[in-house]
Amino acid sequence: MVSDFFKRIAASLSSVAVSAALLAAIAAPVQAQTGTIHLLVGFPAGGGTDVIARTLAEKLKDQLGANVIVENRAGAGGQIAAQALKAAPADGTTYFLTHDHTVSILPLVVKNPGFDPAKDFVAAAGFATFVNALAVSGATPAKSMNEYVAWVRGSQNGKGNVGVPAPASVPEFLVKLIGEKYKLDLAAAPYRGSAPMIADMLGNQIGAGVGSIPDFIENHKAGKIRVVAVLGDKRQPSLPDVPTFAELGLAGFEDVPYYGIFAPAGTPRASIDRFAEAISKVIAMPDVRDRLTAMGLTVGYMPPAQLAAREHAYSQTWARIIKASGFQAQ
């Protein structure tokens, strides 16, 4: 009798243990989903990429049931943030929102960037494409590309500094090609992100800058700076009166850059898919889409595989351009 009693107690405890284990297994992913997600940004607060990240983060927290915190790890063209992503735990709590420069261009122009996108990152979701543009400061009398060229030739003796948001970036290569086409002695002046570059343009410390439309659009609309030419194969809806570089005779820049989100390699597929689904829902919201469009983005969802393919193709295109320019990785 006593033996049977203890057997029943043991069976009961075993059942409780199994039930507890099942509850723990069910609760574990819920706890992870309702924790904190870190969204890394490689550029300073106030710049275009930062504003985009905060716009998405505000809506993502409801879709994911988690706090989404934007962390600015500014410096070295996003290199610091990329290295932070590589070092982050691959548990679905850390993502990196970036444009093409950090993931596709930096590995081509820096010998030891401290990360290898093909090995260290996994694509999570793409959400937009955009174009770069040349803008002039308010103190510059030019209101068009031709007027800017004439101003540099006349008032500046053919020489000029043009701001770029990062060294060895697409904007820097564009400055070189503009100078070659118009026979101007243009020097790229690299900044630590678009925000300080635009601050100097607004303060008339530098006459022109090359950056993304999201970086320029608000100040252009306010008349504080003037966008005079854009990349891409067609004019932008947000700037219908601004010609493309191809229209002006500078072809070869029709493959537009992208915005995407990446996770550390090894992040569970379920976490990636859930995050990607949340992004697709957020950018479909009219208020989010309208805000991103007003910033000069062409909004469009790219699932993980599509973003990975686009990143690879873009990197291959620019590898050829950079090699042809004679640039040597630093």
Image (cartoon, helix red, strand yellow):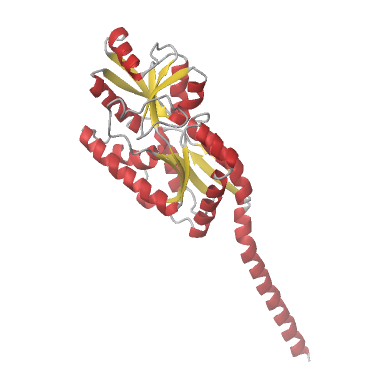
**Residue drawn at 59 percent across, 38 percent down:** 287
Residue 148 % position (x, y): 34, 15
Of residues 182 and 39, the one nearer the viewer is 182
User: Relative to 316, is 270 above or below?
Assistant: below
Left or right, 83 with respect to 293, comes to left
Residue for point 52% across, 59% down? 270
In the depicted view, which residue is nearer to us: 190 or 320? 320
Q: Position of residue 212 (x, y in %)?
A: 42, 30
* Location of the C terminus (image quadrant): top left
Residue 319 in the image: state x and y as whole percent.
27, 41
Q: Nearer the viewer, residue 161 or 8?
A: 161
Quadrant of the rendered structure where residue 226 is?
top left
In the displayed structure image, the side of residue 184 where residue 192 appears, left or right: right
Q: Is residue 35 left or right of residue 297?
A: right
Question: Farthest residue in the bottom direction?
Answer: 1
In the image, farthest residue toward the top: 155
Q: Residue furthest right?
A: 1
Q: Quadrant of the N terminus?
A: bottom right
Is residue 180 positioned above or below 123 on the image? above
Total marks in image: 0
Could you tell me residue 208's position as x and y percent? 38, 19
Task: Specify whether residue 116 is in view.
Answer: no
**Residue 169: quadrant of the picture:** top left
From where the camera sits, is residue 107 visible?
A: yes
Q: Nearer the viewer, residue 70 or 240?
A: 240
